[in-house]
Amino acid sequence: MNNLQHVGLDVHKNTIDTSVFKGWSKEPELEKLLPNEWAKIKGFFERLKTNGSVVACYEAGCMGFELQRKLMSIEVPCMVVAPGLVPRRPGERIRTDRRDARKLARHLRSGELTAIHIPTQEDEAARDYLRMLDDFKMELKKTRQRLLHFLLRHNIVYTDGTHWTGKHEKWLKSLSFEDPLLKDTFDEYFFHLKELEEKTGRMKEKIEEIALRESYQEKVANLKCFRGIETLTALSLVVEIGDFRRFVKAEEFMAFLGLVPSENSSGDKRRQGGITKAGNSHLRRLLVEAGWQYRFNRTVSKRLASRRKGQAPSVVAYANKAGRRLSKKFNRLIFRNKKSQVAVVAVARELAGFIWGMMAGQIA
């Protein structure tokens, strides 16, 4: 331990503040500001290795995992830590990059940091593609809203059914405007909308191709046996989580998704609030969306039956068991006068437990 060096890194686009603690010394052995250039970083760590073993850490953020992978390539163990779980003193009011690096090194030495999962490069590439689709779908939704708001301002309202159907699109194409500038405005909105629809459609086809890769195909197919989970949600779960067995039990996976109730209990009083919303917000939203499919205990649809075709009977039976239980849970909560939004979040939490059971090999 006396020769072990703990290095805290405060990483930014152009610079990296470093703080090195050797053994159990109270003060840092070395502090240095490095340019964020791999040649300089590599030289710095190679010099440290001549004085003993080195371990390093930095907070997860926009800089991703490239630094961690490069440090591992030169045999320097590096932990990427969850920023929200780094201990902080209540009275601490001064914060600088140097202090942050020093604090990370101290907490690394005392074992108080929580490491996050580092995805493989293949998983990270697939995850970025899926999140890009999510961004474009959000832009598509906003563009639709802007177009409808533009028409509403000019008292042009569609009253013959729901929006964004074939009939509605035909009605949009038939609109005419006396003012040429209004016509140009409508055309810009409309053709941008069609461009986004074409782009998202093309990306969804690509996602179907990604899901057929050997490393994903079986896992995605198993997850698609659940009602409400299709390729996008299934593939997102696989690439975001990686190995589900890193969660010892289902409750840990639920907590990772932020679907467990918050709590502020003391003495004889127990106070529980809304869900913590900690962890992976992207997956939490997808599971809540899937939870709406369990409002009714429906029979197996043709679409679900086609997804289950060729799957192991034990997997299908497990998914059916989940469907019956989750539908009962939703209806029981509604009967107790809970809001439907509260009920569906509770269903999403239990659905996460069933997903963990399937992916961790706990099917009974």
Image (cartoon, rainbow, N blue to C red):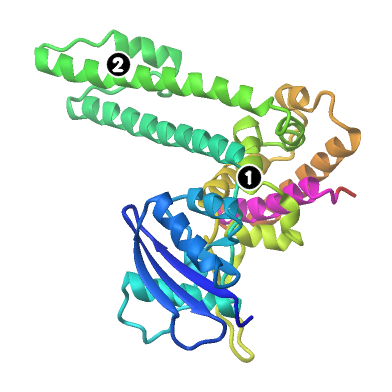
Q: Secondary structure at mark 1?
A: helix
Give the numbered dot on residue 191: 2
Rendered residue at 49%/20% (across/down): 201
| Front one among 301 and 206 | 206
Rendered residue at 47%/74% (across/down): 20
| Front one among 10 and 157 | 10
Residue for badge 1: 291
* Region rendered in magenta: 341-362
Number of residues whose C-alpha sits closer than 10 Å to that of mark 2, classed few (under 14), some (14–19) or many (20 or more): few
Mark 1: amino acid: Gly
Residue 205: percent from left, percent from top: 56, 20
Considering only vertical position in the picture, is 345 above or below 93?
A: above
Rendered residue at 38%/29% (across/down): 140
Rendered residue at 28%/23% (across/down): 157
| Front one among 97 and 82 | 97
Give the numbered dot on residue 82: none
Q: Report whether residue 336 is seen.
A: no
192 left or right, relative to 359: left
Considering only vertical position in the picture, is 144 above or below 323?
A: above
Considering only vertical position in the picture, is 324 above or below 262?
A: above
Residue 345: percent from left, percent from top: 59, 54
353 left or right, relative to 114: right
Camera-side mark, 1 or 2: 2
Mark 2: amino acid: Phe
264 left or right, relative to 362: left
Residue 244: percent from left, percent from top: 72, 51
Q: Secondary structure at mark 2?
A: helix
The secondary structure that most of the magenta stretch takes on is: helix
Does 163 appear in magenta?
A: no
Residue 115: percent from left, percent from top: 59, 63
